[in-house]
Image (cartoon, rainbow, N blue to C red):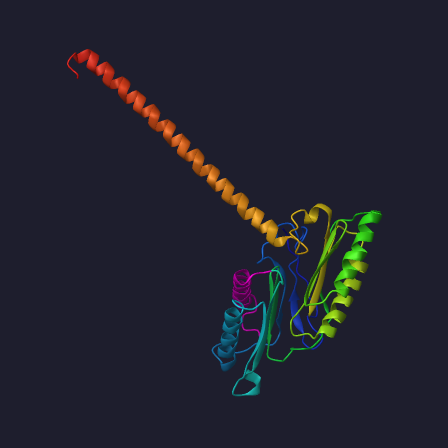
Amino acid sequence: MSATERRLPFSSFLTFLYGAIVILTSPSSSASLDTFVFVGCTIQKYIPNSPYDSNLNLLLTRLVTSSASATYGNFTVLGSASQNTIYGLYQCRGDLNSGDCSQCVAGAVSRLGTICSDACGGALQLEGCFVKYDNKSFFGVEDKTVVLKKCGASIGSDVEGLTGLDAALEYLVSSGGTYKTGGSGDVRSVAQCVGDLSVSECQDCVSDAIGRLKSACGPYSWGDLFLAKCYARFTTGADHAQDNGNGFGYANANANKEESKGNDNETNKTLAIIIGLIAAVALLILFITYLNKKCEKGKGCK
């Protein structure tokens, strides 16, 4: 996996120094939950050990704690002065359980503390979760700024693939909820909105993301289009061979990977036991042979 960095506007109401770390393989190829997708930090800084610093630590702690029981949450920590008030949220991928969600959010919070050190605002998207905080409220604000666009290999004139793509993506528009998965033929699709958007805002955001995704990555084997408040993704053919019904098959691919590791470990243990037994038997035979020879020489061994 390689990475590239770009400077882009992160939202329509804040100026971000934006660095995108792009996955160069298919998004469904056993990507781990803590794999980077993009990250951005505000230019504005706060003073270390200030009231804002304390409030930020309190906010991030609340995000991690809440993620153990819910896949989405937003919090506001009020300061004694308006400039010390801070807003933040987290959003886990809709198919994650509470344990995976909490682990992903904790990892994202830890990385933000390093990447966006002393920044008044920061946002980090991992494969499994999204975390954002700022000193200006962004809750309920629909933002369709493109923050990441990435396409796979060209599929050329594969008419069936293109037809399946249209149907798979259109299904996302018509389905409800903030986390949507679909499929048609050999294509799987997934979309998700940040939980602070209304139903209509979510549909509008996803529709916009899908339109841009089809335009940018339609003739390719997979595509990612992330807007500031939602995303849409698709993958085709062998790229989703590990699909388990959740759209992309991340969980199943990871599970198969862990299962494979477990099987390898069991095989190694079994081989070690067998080799140990063979060595023990060989030593026993050598010892008995040695005693027999000694007894024959001494003629007095019983």
Give the percent coordinates (x, y) of residue 188: 72, 54
Give me the residue at 77% from left, 67% from top: 207
Farthest residue in the bottom direction? 81
Main SS type for the magenta part?
Answer: helix
Give the percent coordinates (x, y) of residue 174: 77, 65
Q: Quadrant of residue 286?
A: top left
Q: Is residue 244 above or below residue 51?
A: above
Give me the residue at 81% from left, 57% from top: 166
Q: Is residue 292 above or below residue 158?
A: above
Q: Nearer the viewer, residue 264 or 11?
A: 264
Q: Is residue 282 above or below residue 102?
A: above
Q: Is residue 225 visible?
A: no
Q: Quadrant of residue 224?
A: bottom right
Q: Is residue 297 above or below residue 162?
A: above
Give me the residue at 65% from left, 48% from top: 242
**Relative side of 220 to 73, left or right:** right
Q: Which residues are magenta?
A: 96-120
Give the percent coordinates (x, y) of residue 70: 56, 69
